[in-house]
Amino acid sequence: MTREASQLAWPVIGHEWAVRLLAQTLRHGRLSHAYLFVGPPGVGKTTLARALAQAMLCSQEDPASRPCGACRACQLVRQDRHPDVRLVAPPGPDRALSIEQIRELQREASLSPMEGRSKVFIVRELDRATPQAANALLKTLEEPPPHVTLLLTAVQREALLPTVVSRCQVLALRPLSIAVVEEALRERWEVAPEQAALLARLSGGCLGVAVAALEDEDVGARRQQAIERMMHALEADRVTRLELAEQLSQEPEAVREIVSLWLGWWRDVMLIQSGCDDRIVNIDQRDVLQRAARYWAHERVREIVQGLRDTLEYMEANVNTRLALETLLLSLPYAPSRQA
């Protein structure tokens, strides 16, 4: 198998530079004891980590031929069933990576590999670890067993201990082009062209986000409801807007997604006003977006976009959600039909 064919065998869509780097490092026997993959949710961090685990444990003798994707080891890693590969992740969307999980990792790391050349631990969302868990993992990074490789992922590099980052080789993954995501959805997931185009844009170039939306039967309904709520707010008086703020504040798991969808909608309005129609996300809303772009002044739309960004930042900083939503909704303009 040629070097180029081996790289194509990596089960990773996009991120060619990272695949080339890791394949070359593996080929020359210079793998680090720890890698940190950083990037936005759904960008492919865990996929790349799992592919590296396949390449490390593949039964092919020639490193340039790994991963082959067909041997028993490659198949077991792909199925998350290899005895020498362990995936460690926060136990839930609102729960942190715990020190108990790291201690269990350390216990397993002290044991010899059962089948492969080494043991591989994929630790997801390390930026959601408790301080105690992060400090415990640091000890393993400082004195790793010779047969252990740690593959860490994080969304926010700045949320990690600098000492943790300094002991890893860092690979920062960026979103893929919309065209690459759209093509992958059409060809690998057999998605209809119109749906693939919309999902690719809504994903922001993060294939994992697009695939998750494809598998979530309710995502389309939630998006439509979010847009309808915004349209209702534009038509509503101040009292109704305050009632909507209270209602949304009682939906903590959904409110960030809703405000993010609103932000994407208004950003599209701004793009149309700037002559960048081909870059809009909500392509199924094009007619409504164009009417909004004609009606509201560009400066007013920019203020709305900034207000939505500020609201998301306030919610991330745990500012009173209801207060942030009230401020946002009261700042929105009134629809033309209401002003008429």
Image (spheres, grey):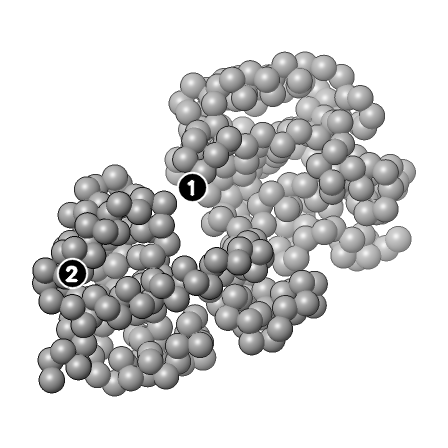
As displayed, is residue 116 above or below residue 217? above
Question: Is residue 158 in view?
Answer: yes
- Residue 84: image x %, image y %? 74, 27
Q: Is residue 174 left or right of residue 252?
A: right
Q: Residue at coordinates 88% horizontally, 53% vertically from top-left?
A: 1
Q: Residue 37's mark?
A: none
Q: Quadrant of residue 120?
A: top right
Q: Nearer the viewer, mark 1 or mark 2?
A: 2
Label whose residue precedes the other's in the sequence (1 or 2): 1
Identify which residue, 48 or 191, lies in the foreground.
Answer: 191
| Residue 146 location (% of width, % of height) | 70, 20
Which disc, if any, is residue 241? Answer: 2
Say which residue label 1 marks.
Answer: 156
- Front one among 29 and 34: 34
Q: Residue at x 42, y 72 (%)?
A: 282
Tell me the kind of residue under disc 1. Answer: Gln
Tag 1's secondary structure?
loop
Asked if residue 108 is positioned above or below residue 6 in the image, the reply reads above
Considering the numbered disc 2 on the image, is that residue within a helix, a strand or a loop? helix
Q: CA distance from mark 1 to mark 2?
A: 34 Å
Residue occupying image coordinates x 43% and y 70%: 281
Location of residue 48 in the rendering, given as x and y in whole percent from the top left corner: 64, 46
Density class for disc 2 (Cα within 10 Å; few <14, some 14-19, many ≥20) is many
